[in-house]
Amino acid sequence: MEEIRATTQLPALRKEITLSTKDGQVLVGELATPLGKAPKATLITLHPLPTHGGFMDSHLYRKAANRLPALIDVAVLRFNTRGTSSPRGTSSGSFDGGVLEEHDVAAAVAFCQERGLENLWLVGWSFGTELAIKYGPDHQIQGAILISPPLHRATDQDLARWNEFDRPLIALVPGDDDYLQPAEAAKRFAIVPKAQVIGFEGEKHLWIGENATRRALDAISEIVAPGSAPLPTQY
């Protein structure tokens, strides 16, 4: 066995995929699934702000795709929202500040449903949390996990929709976040009484370092596969 490090890529079936949106855009991405078994759940990841370096390879998502199919038998879908580039390629269209990205979220959910993937979770990070909050209630998902939610674009009205949507809304909030820290997050999310705000003392918005990565992936894993955390640190 070897220690799992930042660059470790555990066994999985990895396929380059494209998503077609209802407004005619083609989004590039990757689907990683467990080898030889059906995934217990599927994480549909929504990346940070593309105008500030966010893309499908943002490190928490790359590491989730590299580890979680093997460690907890879940699938991880990563893709570039419209106008976003990565080594995988560039998605067509242009960044629209979270408005036309509604179609990107819908295309990702539809892709998973068409392939029979079950127990779909939206997992947003920073800008991606805005998309999960705004558009999650429009889809048949298990719930949404919000990593470092800034609540810049998602309004109180967007949050209030979750009160009519019988699915969990869980925020993972760094204690030293640049935009929204746990105490203020608890106030902002109070409009959704069922929402959970979990603080992570000492962490920052970008979750830099292996310890931060493990804390984030442990939390995500425990939500989608109860009893799976803490994740192994060797494989």
Image: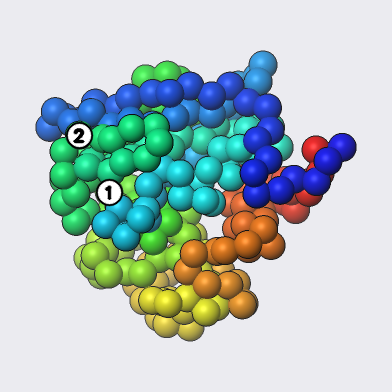
Report the Cα–Cα distance between label 1 and label 2: 21 Å
**What crowding class fits label 1: few (fewer than 14 Cα within 10 Å), some (14-19), or many (20 or more)?**
many
Foreground: disc 1 or disc 2:
2
- Label count reads 2
Residue 166 visible, this orientation: no
Kind of residue indicated by mark 2: Ser
In the rendered image, the quadrant that contains the N terminus is top right
Q: Which residue is mark 2?
A: 92
| Residue 35 can be seen, yes or no | yes
**Mark 1 is on which residue type?**
Tyr
Residue drawn 61% across and 37% down?
A: 66
Of residues 190 and 79, the one drawn nearer to the viewer in this rendering: 79
What percent of the width, then of the height, locates residue 128?
35, 54
Callout 2: helix, strand or loop?
loop
Residue 119 on image: x %, y %? 50, 35
At a point 39% along the width and 72% down the height, the residue shown is 189
Horizontal side of residue 132 vs 68, given as left or right: left
Residue 135's tag is 1
The residue depicted at 30 percent of the width and 53 percent of the height is 50
